[in-house]
Structure formats: C-alpha cells, structure tokens
C-alpha cells in the first residue's frame, strides 16, 4: 500500500495520482482492482448514496459505517475519509475525537477537512497528533449554503490570491495533499507549482498532480445530472435499467427461472413424499 510520502514522491516524479470516491464493498473492491492510488470515502455519500440533497446531514456514524465497508473491499488501498459537516469547527477537541473515531472505528488512513482560515489550526493539531490530513479548498460543498450554491471559486485575482495563500498554509500545517475543487485551471496550476504536496483536482483542469471524481458520477450510477467537469467513463444506469426491465418482464411472462436455475428432488424421494 502507498503511504503519504509516496504521494509526495509521485508529484516529484511527475506521476499522476488517480483518486476515486467509494462508499461500499463492491465499489471499493473494483476501485482497488482498477489500480486506483487512493480511495476517498467522501461525504458526497449523503447525496449519491443516501439520497440527501446536500452533505450537511451526514454524520460520523455514517462515515464510520461506510468506511468499514470500503476497507473490507480494498484492504490494500490508502483510504481517506471526510470529516463530516460541523464535526471539526466547534472545538479542536471535538475535531480530534471525530478523527480518532474515523481512524480507529472506521479504519481510514487519513481524514479530509474542508476550508482554510480557522480550519488550518485544527489541521495542525491533527497532524501533530499523528492524523494524516488532506485539505480541501475552492468549492467546499459543506459550506455551499454560505457560498450561495455549487459555484466555481477563485475567479477573481483577489479570491485567487487568497486561495494560494491558504493552500500554502495548509501545507505548512502539515497536510500531505490538497483537493482543489471547481477553480480555474490556471489557478490550480499555480497552486500546484507553489506547493510541495500533491494537488488533487476536481473541476480544476489538467495541471494538477492528480484527479478525483465521484464514483457514481464518472460511471453514471444512480445519478441523473452531473457537473460540467465530469467525463462519462461508463453508463451503469443503462446496464441496470436494461437488466431490471428484462428481469421484470421474464418473471411476469414465466420465462425466468428456467430448468437450469432450479433444484431437483430425485424420484425415490418424491415417491416417499407422496406415499
Ligand atoms: O465528498 C466528496 O466526494 C469529495 C470529493 C468530491 C473531493 O469531497
Ligand atoms: Na466531501
């Protein structure tokens, strides 16, 4: 399994880092088989798997439950789990306890936190205590309510320079990687150039050190609309719709199950049964 220093080395060597989210055993197993460098148990869980309309309702218990499933599916892959909404803002103590729960009970190798400012102090605390931390700047879905929706961030010189400063502070606070979500490609390139730690982009263009996408988005799996930055790498919806439709039809028409799907009792036992 790769370690936090391996990811920094990959950046130094110009080797791109491929990250995907996963929320359960089969997804994680297939991600590991595909050679994914790290899996993120994102709190996007709330939207793509649990059916909430934001990441706000996701709890630590939800994250632990799904991290355990992912871990069973991908025992040899580095796993990052999101600290959910408001679990690292009330106090540093709460943040530390939340991270401990995710690592000890969930079994993740690192946690991810959204935002700069005060969160950077918490990041420092966590890394000092031995918790590997991934930072997350740009569009931070947990604060979408405050940002006024899911919008591209850092488009003005002022907001871009603030983001660069905060990214540097995240690195100084000990983060070993940083997710950059929904920012102009030129800004993502500049952040990547200024940092030693790898940048993992999502809607941040190609000049970053790695990419992350939501599993269900890139495979069209249970989602209808996907953001502009998603490429369609597969169509699970189509496969499932076709399969389930045929199943319903065949059950109703008595075509399924066939003899080869059925078990047989031998004649002797049948004779005994009927006397
Ligand atoms: O929760 C998530 O899936 C994420 C990624 C989009 C980076 O945080
Ligand atoms: Na997230």
Image (cartoon, rainbow, N blue to C red):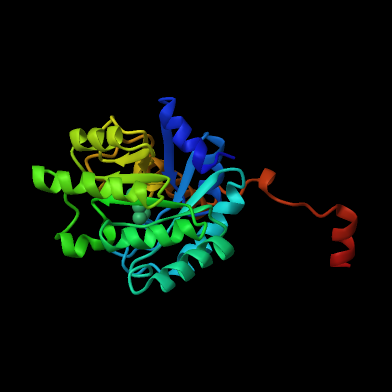
Picture coordinates of residue 239, whole percent (x, y): 43, 41
Quadrant of picture, ligand 2: bottom left
Nearest the eye: 257 or 38? 38
> Eyeballing the image, is 159 above or below 207?
below
Picture coordinates of residue 47, whole percent (x, y): 34, 59
The answer to which quarter of the image holds residue 51 is bottom left
Nearest the eye: 237 or 3? 3
> Eyeballing the image, is 151 above or below 274?
above
Q: Is residue 67 left or right of residue 166?
A: right
Say which quadrant the N terminus sits in.
top right
Q: Is residue 171 left or right of residue 64?
A: left
Picture coordinates of residue 8, whole percent (x, y): 45, 36
Picture coordinates of residue 62, whole percent (x, y): 46, 66
Question: Residue sitting at 37 percent across and 52 percent down?
Answer: 173
Residue 36 in view of the camera = no
Residue 138 in view of the camera = yes
Nearest the eye: 82 or 13? 13
The answer to which quarter of the image holds residue 50 is bottom left
Question: Residue sitting at 78 percent across and 52 percent down?
Answer: 264
């Amino acid at each position: 399994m790769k370690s936090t220093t391996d990811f920094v080395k990959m950046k130094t060597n110009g080797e791109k880092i491929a990250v995907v989210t996963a929320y359960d055993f089969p997804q994680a197993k297939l991600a590991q088989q595909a050679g994914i460098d790290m899996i993120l148990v994102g709190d996007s869980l709330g939207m793509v798997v649990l059916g909430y309309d934001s990441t706000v309702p996701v709890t630590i218990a939800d994250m632990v439950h799904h991290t355990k499933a992912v871990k069973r599916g991908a025992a040899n892959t580095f796993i990052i789990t999101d600290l959910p909404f408001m679990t690292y803002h009330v106090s540093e103590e709460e943040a530390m306890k939340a991270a401990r729960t995710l690592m000890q009970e969930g079994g993740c190798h690192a946690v991810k936190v959204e935002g700069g400012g005060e969160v950077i102090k918490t990041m420092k605390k966590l890394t000092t205590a031995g918790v590997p931390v991934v930072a997350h700047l740009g569009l931070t879905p947990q604060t979408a309510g405050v940002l006024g929706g899911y919008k591209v961030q850092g488009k003005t010189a002022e907001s871009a320079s603030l983001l660069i400063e905060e990214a540097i502070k995240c690195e100084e606070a000990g983060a070993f990687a940083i997710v950059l979500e929904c920012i102009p490609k030129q800004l993502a390139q500049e952040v990547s150039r200024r940092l030693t730690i790898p940048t993992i982009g999502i809607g941040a263009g190609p000049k970053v050190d790695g990419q992350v996408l939501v599993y269900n988005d890139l495979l069209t799996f249970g989602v209808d609309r996907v953001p502009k930055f998603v490429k369609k790498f597969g169509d699970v919806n189509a496969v499932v719709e076709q399969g389930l439709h045929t199943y319903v039809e065949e059950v109703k028409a008595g075509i399924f199950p066939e003899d080869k799907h059925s078990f047989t009792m031998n004649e002797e036992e049948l004779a005994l049964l009927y006397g």
